[in-house]
Amino acid sequence: MQWDPLSAFIRVHLRLANLGTVVTTNPTPRSRLPEWLRIRLPVTDTFFETRSLLADLKLHTVCESAKCPNHWECWGRGTATFMIAGDRCTRACGFCAVTTGKPLPLERDEPARVAEAARRMRLKHVVITAVARDDLPDGGAEHFRLTIEAVRAASPGIITEVLVPDFLDCDSSMETVLSAHPDIFNHNLETVRRLTSKVRFRATYDRSLRVLRKVKMWRGNAIYTKSGLMLGLGETEEELLTALGDLRRAGCDLLTLGQYLRPTLRHLPVVEFIPPSRFDEYRRIAERMGFSHVASGPMVRSSYHADEVHEPGARG
Ligand code: SF4
């Protein structure tokens, strides 16, 4: 059997730290959130300006649709994550609050409206995501391409990050998105292998790794690949470190780790609230594994402070 330095690293870490078990901290659905998960409410007018601009341009955001707990903070900083291709998803993941339903036809002027929003918000880094559109032959890839191009035309020099579904591992869809030259290609693994079928709908752990691996293989250092996991769904530390090793083997550059929070009582319960000190430890481990930037903390989400990835030494 070939020696794999990442596996060896994980084994040594687990032995030293005596890790590998789940510690459950009274995770009843209505239990009070720990102190470190308190949501900060807006203190400036920027939140309301962001809200009214997005409403004027009739845009969807994952901030609202997914009931992101950072919605107040991010909009208060004048940032948001645009969600294109409608607000109805063809999948029904156990963690996600985005509405599942029969999607509406794509809106041809949506790329221009996203571009206009990014321009008016003076964004230097835009994050564009979409609902999964398994009903479309290309999964919505062409719509991503048009949106990236429109944003770049309206805001030259802007950094473009896409957070994409798995496109059912369709090479031509991935190539379509890549043809617009996004700076960062983000696709979330979301959880460890054992929990994937319970947490995600129609997605598979290996398919997500394949998507990331292919993009890195095709574009190399011309693009950053990024992925993220939610913690507190019942994963063990050993399973988590194995997933991080799998991501590194797929060439993933950037990583986000955050606490899963149940958006409604219809969604999967939280199994564990991970304290900030453990998120710090995971960040240090992930950095030693070779990720070039790691954002790890209870409130971290894929797009949380996404613009900080280009600040040397920045931490999420
Ligand atoms: S973390 Fe991302 S999804 Fe959540 S509010 Fe901020 S920009 Fe929106």
Image (cartoon, rainbow, N blue to C red):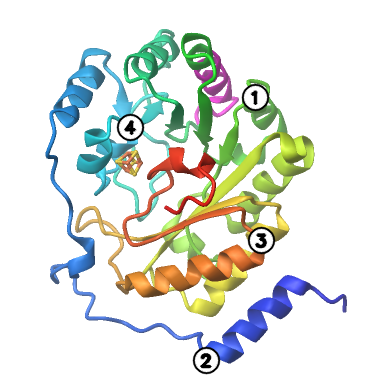
Q: Residues within 10 Å of mark 2 (few under 14, many from 20)?
A: few
Range of magenta residues: 135-149
Q: Label 2 is placed on what type of residue?
A: Asn
Q: Position of residue 314 (x, y in %)?
A: 47, 50
Does mark 2 have its CB less than 8 Å from ligand 1?
Answer: no
Is residue 55 shown in magenta? no
Q: Label 1 is placed on what type of residue?
A: His
Badge 2 or badge 4: first in the primary sequence: 2
**Predominant SS of the magenta segment:** helix
Badge 2 or badge 3: first in the primary sequence: 2
Q: Are marks 2 and 3 in contact (CB under 8 Å)?
A: no
Badge 2 or badge 1: first in the primary sequence: 2
Above or below: residue 24 compared with residue 206: below
Question: Marks 1 and 3: which is nearer the front?
Answer: 3
Q: Position of residue 235 (x, y in %)?
A: 45, 73
Residue at image position (68%, 77%) is 9
Task: Tell me the residue that label 3 is attached to.
Answer: 290
Quadrant in the picture for the N terminus: bottom right
Q: Is residue 189 visible?
A: no
Relative placement, left or right, of 26 versus 17 is left
Is residue 141 shown in magenta? yes
Q: Residues within 10 Å of mark 3 (few under 14, many from 20)?
A: some
Secondary structure category for the residue under label 3: loop
Q: Residues within 10 Å of mark 4 (few under 14, many from 20)?
A: many
Secondary structure category for the residue under label 2: loop
Task: Tell me the residue that label 4 is attached to.
Answer: 80
Task: Tell me the residue that label 1 is attached to.
Answer: 181
Above or below: residue 70 compared with residue 289: above
Task: Tell me the residue that label 2 is attached to.
Answer: 18
Cα–Cα span, label 2 and label 4: 40 Å
